[in-house]
Amino acid sequence: MAKAVKTTPKQSKGPSTDPNTGKTALVEMRDISIAFGGIKAVDHASCDLYPGEVVALLGHNGAGKSTLIKILSGAYSRDSGDIYVDGKEAIITNPRHAKDYGIETIYQTLALADNVDAAANLYLGRELLTRWGTLDDAAMESETRKVMNRLNPNFKRFKDPVKQLSGGQRQSVAIARAIHFNARILIMDEPTAALGPAETKQVGELTHQLKEDGIGIFLISHDIEDVFDLADRCIVMKNGAIVGSAQTKDVTKDEVLGMIILGKCPAGAIPGPGALDV
Amino acid sequence: MAENKTDAQAAEPTVSVDKVESGFVRFLRATEIDTRMLGMIGALLLIWVGFHFYGLFANGFAAFLTPRNLWNLSVQTSSIAVMATGMMLIIVTRHIDLSVGSMLGFVAMIMGITQVWILPEYLGLDHPLTWIITVAVGIAFGALIGAFQGFLVAYLSIPAFIVTLGGLLIWRGSAYLVARGETIAPVDTTFALIGGGPYGTIGATGTWIVGVLACLAIIGVLISGRRSRIRFKFPLRPMWAEYLIGGAGCFFVLITVLVMNAYPWPKGIVRQVAKAQGVTPEDIGFVSHGLAIPVLIAIAVGIFMTFLTTRTRFGRYVFAIGGNPEAAELAGINVKKMTLLIFSLMGALVGISAVIASARLKSATIALGQLDELYVIAAAVIGGTSFAGGIGTIYGAILGALVMQSLQSGMVLVGFDAAIQQMVVGGVLVAAVYLDTLYRKNSD
């Protein structure tokens, strides 16, 4: 099991490297804490992500996984802790900063402006402009048509506000937005929660493709099947703290469920500060 | 693929509806005319014709559809229309501004003091710079008040309803305080031209020039729109629809020009001018008013605001924030800063309206702008701005202002009581919001 050991340095200086390959972590969050009115939503949590790796974040509702990831995407400002991107300390205090580091997020709620069309959503916050500084809607729509053609060839409703689209179509708009701007780190918060089986499969295929391109993916999911299908590694949280992390190939689904429900770390996992003391 | 299936299922009913859909629906689709706008124009015509014939039958004279009344209507609408374009943005971002009427009163008072009490001391009476400085002070002051209210809403998270309800009282009180309740008059003579009146117009020739330019602009927009659609291979409107829209637009411009030019200077003014020039009134003859300066200002504001909302990042963000504030924030839009800017823009527009309103009265009075907030909000809502946020158009807000002002001036014209007028305006506001809710339920 020694092979699975990854450094989870709490005190050491500098970014961590993968002992197996010597690669620098794409992103590393170290000792992150945030509290909302006395409730410690995330309590000294650390996690890392390597290029081409899919890391699942698991835990009950309120375990702190969405909060942790929203700190990375800039939606929340952490109380303490550091974030490193490519081994360099990153300053992320709002969503724009995160995007500058190539961190893109597909939110559970999709975070689409329902009243505008697909192109406007795709380019929201980074609109294409003409040389006079006005919106270049035609260029944006034309680019959107190209992206959507690749992602979801059935997508034809470019002029409609996204409110009028089906769940799957809305999802593809949200995904297109996340991958269109050369994301290096992709956060998927419950990407398949609202989808049918076929669309879920599509998301799976997309994940594999992105992985091959060397993009690191944080996957937040309730669905243990999803996790074992897609993720290389899983990190389990409970009450805001990390229970432990494990390569998915080293643990069984029941063991992971044990981590989620009881906070009990199996032999194949590296225990974290939130692990049950045994 | 389930995706295929759902798409096909979704598409099927529309195909079958296509077969039975009426020619009217096909017409609307081809011309891409908004049904809502059509409804608004219909309502407007109904109000106009209604008041015209009500006057004819009830009072024995029909005064509504006369050049004189329509010209007055255009001037009266200007001030409300300018503010309604800003209110549209505020309501789109799910806020409200109840303070615009009081703000208008206060800004007008500040401008009155600037040009009547302060500037003459340094520049003397009727200095050519007086009106420019006054207007600049008014717009800047309005923007500042708006920014302050926007700051309270955005950064201190006080609901806009409360901030501007407070503003409604505070700015009216401030207006009283700075001038101790006095009426400040007379304003600078150049400044007074901005309010319209016989001299504050561009005359028959000027109106024709504006009309021709407007027609050229309509045709230009249609051609460039079609070109860019061709360039990006987007679906085109059928050619007949292009001609129809262009034709209707130019026809409307032509009618407006003819009506505005059909209203002559009143006899008194002609006599005055004749006396000043040492000729007889008969020598001067028929002098057209033509478009009034405040109307031109309102049109310019309308064009600018349409450009701002549809062609710039600012406008895109306004609508994105209205559609989903959280999503806008997550997309990296600085929602707080945008809110401050939107309220500030509203303030600047109130400044422009204050210029128009006080120039029209040729004075700043304590009651100026009273109840304007009601008309402005009603104009925006009648014009299709949704209180749920995210939906609204500038042309809608301006048309809405015209509807409200038509109601108001029509009721005056046929001799309704002031009490009844207020009740009707209030009722129309409530009914408009109800109709809006119905419309959206059906269109979703």
Image: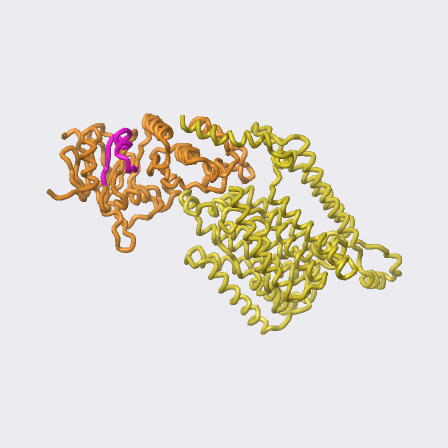
Residue at (62% x, 63% y) in the render: B422
User: In the image, is residue A234 part of the stretch drawn in magenta?
Assistant: yes
Q: Position of residue A21 (x, y in %)?
A: 22, 27
Residue at (31% x, 42% y) in the render: A69
Q: Position of residue A4 (x, y in %)?
A: 18, 30
Looking at the image, the residue that sits furthest to the left is: A278
Residue at (60% x, 41% y) in the render: B34
Question: Can residue B144 be seen by looking at this rendering?
Answer: no
Q: Quadrant of the N terminus of chain A?
A: top left
> Which region shows up in magenta?
A220-236
User: In the image, is residue B98 part of the stretch drawn in magenta?
Assistant: no
Q: Position of residue B49 (x, y in %)?
A: 72, 52
Q: How many marks?
A: 0
Q: Position of residue B242 (x, y in %)?
A: 67, 34
The orange-tinted chain is A
Left or right: A132 with respect to A257?
right
Question: Can residue B154 be seen by looking at this rendering?
Answer: yes
Residue sitting nearer the eye, B139 or A186: A186
Left or right: A94 with respect to B360?
left
Q: Is residue B391 above or below residue B100?
A: above
Q: Quadrant of the C terminus of chain A?
A: top left
Q: Is residue B20 above or below residue B331?
A: above
The quarter of the displayed image where residue A110 is located: top left
The yellow-tinted chain is B
The quarter of the displayed image where residue B401 is located: bottom right
